[in-house]
Structure formats: structure tokens, C-alpha cells
Image (cartoon, grey):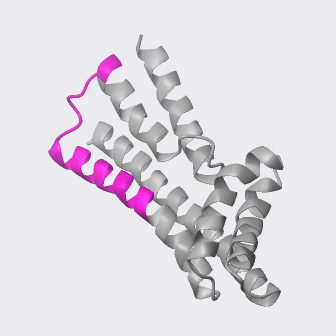
């Protein structure tokens, strides 16, 4: 049973890390779920209040940062609310509509289309699209770092 638990935990960690890059996967929630799998299948004894407080805080920060950093990128490059909404839609739909390339093209095209619908010129729209891609890369980097911190905290909790 212990081996099965560890296999599931590692698979959830891998899914979580992949989800930091590919938005169709659960990302941080998969990493968080791994702690519960470990607890239910092996033991919750290693997890105290501070472990759960830190992990839950990171989960909340990841959700907020994911949107906020993406929106920051768009706004920094001169985009409006329309391009923030468009890039968010593009992040969610892009990978499904255009496999692989849609991960980058989705937010870019979403922001551009959002700006054009809002009545802005092509130049502003393209700048907002570039901002969406910068925001996507920044958000992805933040998610990877925070999820790695979660995994490292898990390992430390087990060793400590």
C-alpha cells in the first residue's frame, strides 16, 4: 500500500508541475491533492498546522497570482480590460483549438481580438497581445517556483 501511495503522490506531483505549464491540467490542486493521498494512505502525522497553513496559503497565492500576473503583463504593455478578458479566454481555449502552439497563440490572439473588439488600433492590440505572452511566461515561472516550494516543504515535513 505504501508503494502505491508513493506512486500516486509522484504522479500527482508530475501532473501538478505539468499543469503549471499546460492550463488544462489541475496544476497546484494536483500537488495539494498529493498531500491528502499521502495522509490517507500512509499518515497525516507528519503534517502539522504550519504545514497546512503554508501549503494552503501557497495554493491561494497561486490562484491569485495566475490571474494577476497575466493581467499585469497585458496592462504593462498598454492593454485594457478587454484584452485581459481576451487573453484569459485564449489561455483556456488556445491549447484545445490549436494544439501545442495554442498555449502561446491563445493568450496573444485573445488579447489582440479583445483590443480590436474594444475599438483600439492594431498597434495597441498587438502590444497587448505581447503583454499577454509576457504575463503568461511570468505567471508560469511563478507557478513552477511556488509548486516546487510546496513539494520541498512536503519533503522537509517528512524528513523533519
Q: Quadrant of the N terminus?
A: top left
Q: Is residue 43 left or right of residue 74?
A: left
Q: Quadrant of the C terminus?
A: top left
Q: Is residue 27 above or below residue 102?
A: above
Task: Decide if residue 120 is in sight here.
Answer: yes
Task: Decide if residue 42 is in sight here.
Answer: no
Image point (57%, 83%), residue name? 75
Q: Position of residue 98 (x, y in %)?
A: 83, 50
Q: Main secondary structure of the magenta part?
A: helix
Q: Is residue 31 left or right of residue 140?
A: left
Q: Residue furthest left?
A: 49
Q: Position of residue 111 (x, y in %)?
A: 69, 71
Tell me which segment is drawn in magenta.
40-64
Q: Position of residue 103 (x, y in %)?
A: 74, 56
Q: Quadrant of residue 41?
A: top left
Q: Is residue 43 above or below residue 30?
A: above
Q: Is residue 25 above or below residue 116?
A: above
Image point (70%, 64%), residue name? 107
Residue 51 part of the magenta-drawn span: yes
Image point (42%, 55%), residue name? 149
Foreground of the two, 150 or 92: 92
Image point (44%, 20%), residue name? 5
Amino acid at each position: 500500500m505504501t508503494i502505491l501511495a508513493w506512486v500516486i503522490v509522484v504522479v500527482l506531483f508530475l501532473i501538478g508541475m505539468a499543469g503549471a505549464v499546460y492550463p488544462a491540467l489541475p496544476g497546484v490542486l494536483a500537488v495539494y491533492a498529493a498531500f491528502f493521498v499521502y495522509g490517507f494512505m500512509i499518515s497525516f502525522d507528519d503534517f502539522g498546522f504550519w504545514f497546512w497553513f503554508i501549503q494552503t496559503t501557497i495554493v491561494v497565492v497561486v490562484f491569485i497570482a495566475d490571474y494577476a500576473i497575466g493581467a499585469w503583463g497585458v496592462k504593462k504593455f498598454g492593454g485594457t480590460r478587454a484584452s485581459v478578458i481576451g487573453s484569459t479566454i485564449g489561455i483556456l481555449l488556445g491549447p484545445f483549438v490549436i494544439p501545442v502552439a495554442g498555449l502561446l497563440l491563445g493568450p496573444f490572439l485573445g488579447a489582440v481580438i479583445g483590443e480590436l473588439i474594444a475599438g483600439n488600433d492594431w498597434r495597441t492590440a498587438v502590444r497587448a497581445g505581447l503583454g499577454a505572452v509576457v504575463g503568461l511566461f511570468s505567471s508560469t515561472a511563478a507557478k513552477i517556483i511556488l509548486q516546487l516550494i510546496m513539494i520541498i516543504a512536503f519533503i522537509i515535513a517528512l524528513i523533519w
